[in-house]
Structure formats: structure tokens, C-alpha cells
Amino acid sequence: MTDTAPPPNPYVLEVTADDFQERVLANSRRGPVLVNFWSRRAGPCLRLYPILDRLSRAFGGGFLLANLDTDRHGRFARRLGITSVPTLKLYRNEEVVETVHGFESEDSLRRRLSRHAATPADMALRLALDTLRQGRREAALQQLAEAAVAHPEDLRIPLTLAKLLVQEGELDQAQRLLATMPEPLRAAPEAQDLAAHVDFLLSAQAAGSSAQPADPSERRFLEAARKLVEEDDLEGAARILADIVETEPQWSGGRARRGLRALMRMIPEDTPLRAELRARLPGLRT
């Protein structure tokens, strides 16, 4: 650290030998505490502190950063096994779960911390799930919607929101949400599976109407949806979709292909049906 005080950071503590038990070990029972053993006489310590400050802000309270000055508390630091600085020790439930000796890059430290510390996205998702467990579904939907905007890179949040919308019967809204996610998120297998499931549910609803589409592939797709949703006939639905993919591989923008991929992830390995579908459509990726 430098003699110039960093901007106020609510996630940083200055600790001593006298308050280590209270400020580090006791706090570690509530969440991760990263102890930075440092000396103003060591250049790597001075280069490391701005990185630690940025990470503590980026994690938004996912861990506390506790700085211990070894120039003032050297004997205590040696009792903790500190023989050189900088050294970082991450405490959780009063136990050391990570140790870093010397200077390390920001990316490397971020990866280490991510294994133990909650990110702002983690905390936003946890808050919404806690609200949902309290039975406040509308409030949870609102929290998830706000979290999806604040953390657009986190796939878990829109998927959780979409699943909750499906449970609420808001299928059109769930479909729009999944369709408007950023492309890297839409390409994730979990997102594709959920989108296919929503498509099946909507198609099963349409299949119950009196009007039947003129397109034979559309009629067959509706039949597959009805078999899956209403009759729980996974095998029958998969075979119908395979028929569509064989005759019209790019029908409706690959809709049948996406649906079949989703169904194949539900079929256990080493089963005759899976072997049959792979033999019929060797180019189908699951």
C-alpha cells in the first residue's frame, strides 16, 4: 500500500494483532475474508494493493479485504506462518482456504476469489431466490428482471426468470426473454433446452385449438409437442421431430432440430432410442 489513502472502500478493513480474532476470524464465519499481509518497504506489496482494492469493489461485498501491516505486527504475522510479503490468506469459517505467496496478476486472483467469494450477480440471484422462498413471487420476478439488466453476462439470472415465468404460465413473455438474450447466452445448451421446452408448451396449446395449420411439418411439430407435453411420450415426440429433420432439416429456422437436440439430452445414454436417432441423423449435435 502507499502513504496516499485510497478512495473510501466499504469492503476494506485495517486489522492488527489485537483485533484479528474479531475482524478476521469472526467475520469469516459470515463470508470470505482475504487477509493481505504487506509492508510499505516491499515494492510488490505496493503494486498489489490497487489490484486488491479493485477486486474488492468488483465483488461488491463478496469478500472483505483485511490489511495487516507486518512492519507493525511482524511477530504476530510470523506466528501465522508469514515469512515473506506480500502474502494473501483467504479465511472461511476461521480456516485458511487459499494462500498466495508473492505478487499475482489480477486475472489470476479473480479466478481464485471466484471459487470462494460471492459476486454481485450471485448476491442478486440469492436475494431473488430468498424472496421466492418467502412466497413473494411478484417481488422475486421484479428482482430477477432488475438483476438481468444489471448483470447481462450471467446466464443463471435470465434462465431463472424464464423458468419462473413458465411456472406462472407467462409462456409468451418467457419466450421473448429467451429470444432477446445476448447471442453467447442464447447459444448455451441450458438456454436452448429451455427455449425448446417453452416452444413445446406453446405448440401444445396451439394444438388444442380447432384450426390446424396448412403446413404439414407444422402439424407434425404440433403433434410432437402434444405427445411430449400432454402424453409424456418422449419417444413418440422424438421420432416425429426426427422425421421432420430428415425431410426438412432447416424447417422453420431449425426449430425441429433444436427441439430434437433438447429431447436427446433427456434420453439416457446407451438406450436403443438414442442409438436409433444418432444412426438416422449422424450430424445432429447434442
Image: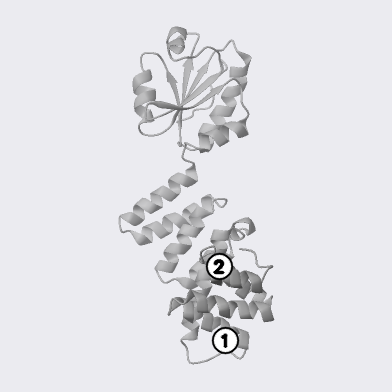
Farthest residue in the left direction? Answer: 134
> Residue 83 in the image: x percent, y percent?
52, 12
Mark pair 2, 1: CA separation: 21 Å
Location of residue 10 (image quadrant): top left
Tag 2: amino acid: Met
Q: Is residue 177 visible?
A: no
For the N terminus, the quadrant is top right
> Residue 252 in the image: x percent, y percent?
65, 77
Scheme of colours in the image = one colour
Location of residue 242 (image quadrant): bottom right
Of 2 and 225, nearer the camera is 225
> Residue 260 in the image: x percent, y percent?
58, 71
Q: Which mark is residue 264?
A: 2
Tag 1: amino acid: Arg
Q: Residue at x 39, y 57 (%)?
A: 140
Q: Is residue 126 above or below residue 167?
A: above
Q: Is residue 153 visible?
A: yes
**N-term-proximal mark, 2 vs 1:** 1
For the C terminus, the quadrant is bottom right
Q: Residue at x 35, y 31 (%)?
A: 29
Mark 1, residue position: 219
